[in-house]
Image: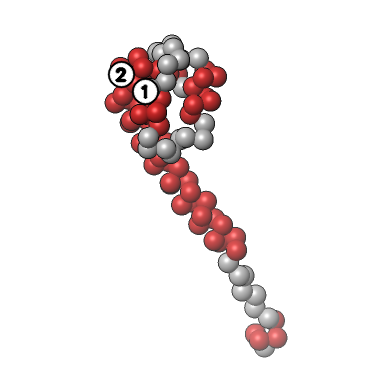
Amino acid sequence: MRLAESHGIVREDFLSNYLGSELDPLWLNRVSKLSAGGWKNFVARAKDSIKELRTQIHTSHWASDAVGGRRKWRSRAPRLTVCASWMR
C-alpha cells in the first residue's frame, strides 16, 4: 500500500481494487488499464517491485494455509484414551 501511495494512488482506491484480488494473477494487467490517477504510473515504474511483493504475499498465503490446514487436521484427529481396566 505504501508503494502505491508513493505513486499517487489514493488509499481507498487501492484497497477497493486490491482486496479480494490478492491471489489474482491478472491483477497487475487489470489495474494497469485503470484511468484513475496514478495507476498507469504505478505499474510502469514499479512493476518489478509489485511482482516481488505479490509473490511474497502469495507464498505466505500458501504457507499459512498449509499450517492452518495441519492445525485443522490435528484438531479433528480422534484422541485415543486408555481405559484404566486394560492396564490391570
Picture disc at residue 87: none
**Residue at disc 1, secondary structure:** loop
Residue 76 point in image, percent of width and height: 60, 63
| Quadrant of the image occupied by residue 8 | top left
Q: Nearer the viewer, residue 15 or 1?
A: 15
Residue 40 appears in the picture as rendered: yes
Residue at numbered disc 1: 32
Asked if the residues shown at circle 2 and circle 1 are in contact, with their CB atoms under 8 angstroms apart, the answer is yes
Q: Nearer the viewer, residue 14 or 81?
A: 14
Residue 66 point in image, percent of width and height: 46, 52
Residue 21 point in image, percent of width and height: 47, 35
Residue at 45 percent across and 15 percent down: it is 36
Looking at the image, how many numbered discs can be counted on the residues? 2
Residue 33 point in image, percent of width and height: 38, 22
Picture disc at residue 44: 2
In this view, 87 is above or below 49: below
Residues under labels 2 and 1: Cα distance? 8 Å
